[in-house]
Amino acid sequence: MNEMVRTTNLTKRYKGAAAVSGLDLRVNEGRVYGFLGPNGAGKTTTLKMLLSLIRPTEGEIEIMGQRMDGKNRVKILRDIGSLIESPSFYGHLTGEENLRILQTLLDVPKENIHKVLQIVRLDGQGGKKAAAYSLGMKQRLGLAGALLSFPKLLILDEPTNGLDPSGIQEMRELIRSLPRQYGMTVIVSSHLLSEIDQMAEDVGIIANGQMKYQGTLDDLHSIDRSKSLEEIFLDLTGRERSL
Amino acid sequence: MIKLLKCEFMKTRRRYVVVTALAVTAAMLVWIYPRHHSGDLLRLGWMANLYELPLINSIFMPLLSIIVSSRLCDIEHKGAMLKQLAVTKRRGQIYDAKLLYGLAIMLFCVVLSWGATIAFGYIAGFEGDVPIKLYLFYLLFTAAPTAAVYIFQHTLSLCFKNQAVTFFSGVIGAFLGTFSMFLPQLLWLRRTLLWGYYAVLMFVGLFDWSKENRYQYAHFEVVGVDWSFFVVLLFICAALYVIGREMFKRKEM
């Protein structure tokens, strides 16, 4: 299986304190990779480094077999869709106008706008100002923007934040379907074990900036059959059950 | 770059950036013109403009720069759009496109107020012909400091999420720049301030003005164009651009 993302000794330090330390991420092509960790574990920092939004202090990033550097950054990023932290949008413009701007920048066909609005089930809402959207609709708009170019790699940081239970389920199903329907590889981060358990095939568990486990979800289950997945996760991250 | 500029135009829909800029320019014109309607100022009108307008510009143009840069950049911060743009295009291109769009609005307002100044002179009946060569110098010496101030404001607006930083540094700068015009003995002050270059590049002086007779025996004369400081200003523009662009490129999002 080809590796879509490979990092070597990826490290980010802020004023000497390591937010991410020596991370060796391996994401296989055509899979949903769940990036799991407690709040403040370093998930968002890692994803931001993959997208060149912040610079690594040390280490290397390879995406689609190409080592990411200043020269090929934009070329590689053209094949990546992302939704990091909060969804990005211009509140004074309609959902469709927002996507129109991204479509112009990405130089993708206009038809993609309606396709992605349909995929995220915002069709019929595209003419409404984004500021008037509910949190869940904003999240969907953000996802529509990430899908607009039908990228090879999709990076989603806590995509179910702000969604109601039915929205979470829809999002889950959508994410699960992306590799099958569009051949995408998806990295999805969450601090919720149950969410990753239902979405991902592979999983990386990060705590205190360090990778504690990486492999298939099935292998994670088989670490200790006598323990629940939650207990295994807590053991790996060194957290108390109350967390 | 054309695509990015097109997107800048699309983004400002319903933001009324140009309308706001025109409103500020109109306010400036309304403030200037009623004074020149009568007496000696009609005789001295054309030259009086060249003497007085740099002072007005030193107040209004930095204010306009704050408004335009802030309105253009705030939408990116509010919608967390910089992250999205930065994974789509080179950061340097994003900085350039926004700067070009903002500068175009600013220069449009500069040219508009310049044209309105001349038109008003004709309507008010200023004596003699418009000294077009001097007015072209004036246009250049208004546009250059405005561009420098705008580049500075643009960088702050783009790099700082909190637009109060942009606002206060712009207002304080504008105040100091205007203040420096009243201190001709402290030439170093206006020369070291970005906002002071409206005064540095003034090339018309007022002579024989008195409290008693006011403009009755007064006259304006060209005291010389100091090109060396114009060149200094161009270097300042280039330095502000290079530093600002690099700051934005290095910004962690």
Image: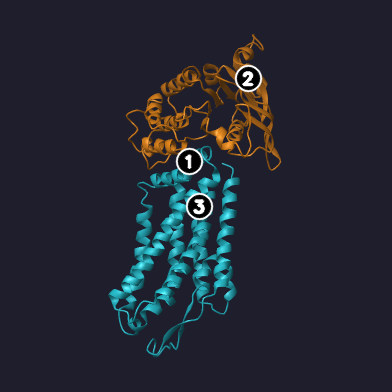
Chain colours: A orange, B cyan
Circle 1 Cα neighbour tier, 10 Å, few/some/many (<14 / 14–19 / ≥20): some
Marker disc for residue B157:
3
What is the CA distance from the residue labelled 3 to the residue labelled 1?
14 Å
Tell me whether circle 2 and circle 3 mark residues in contact (CB < 8 Å): no
Percent of width and height locating residue B155? 53, 53
Percent of width and height locating residue A2? 61, 19
Q: Does label 3 or label 1 sit earlier along the sequence?
A: 1
Give the number of the mark in front: 1 or 2.
Answer: 1
Between A216 and A132, the one nearer to me in the picture: A216
Amino acid at pointer 2: Phe
Q: Chain of mark 3?
A: B
On the question of residue B8 being in view, the answer is yes
Q: Chain of mark 2?
A: A
What is the CA distance from the residue labelled 1 to the residue labelled 2?
34 Å
The quadrant where residue B252 appears: top right
**Callout 2 secondary element:** helix
Q: Chain of mark 1?
A: B
Are labels 3 and 1 on one chain?
yes
Amino acid at pointer 1: Met
Instruction: Look at the picture and state if B111 lies above or below B91.
Output: below
Circle 2 Cα neighbour tier, 10 Å, few/some/many (<14 / 14–19 / ≥20): many
**Callout 3 secondary element:** helix
Quadrant in which the C terminus of chain B is drawn: top right
Marker disc for residue A191:
none
Between B49 and A218, the one nearer to me in the picture: B49
Are labels 2 and 3 on one chain?
no
What is the CA distance from the residue labelled 2 to the residue labelled 3?
43 Å
Marker disc for residue B81:
1
Instruction: Look at the picture and state if B83 lies above or below A38.
Output: below
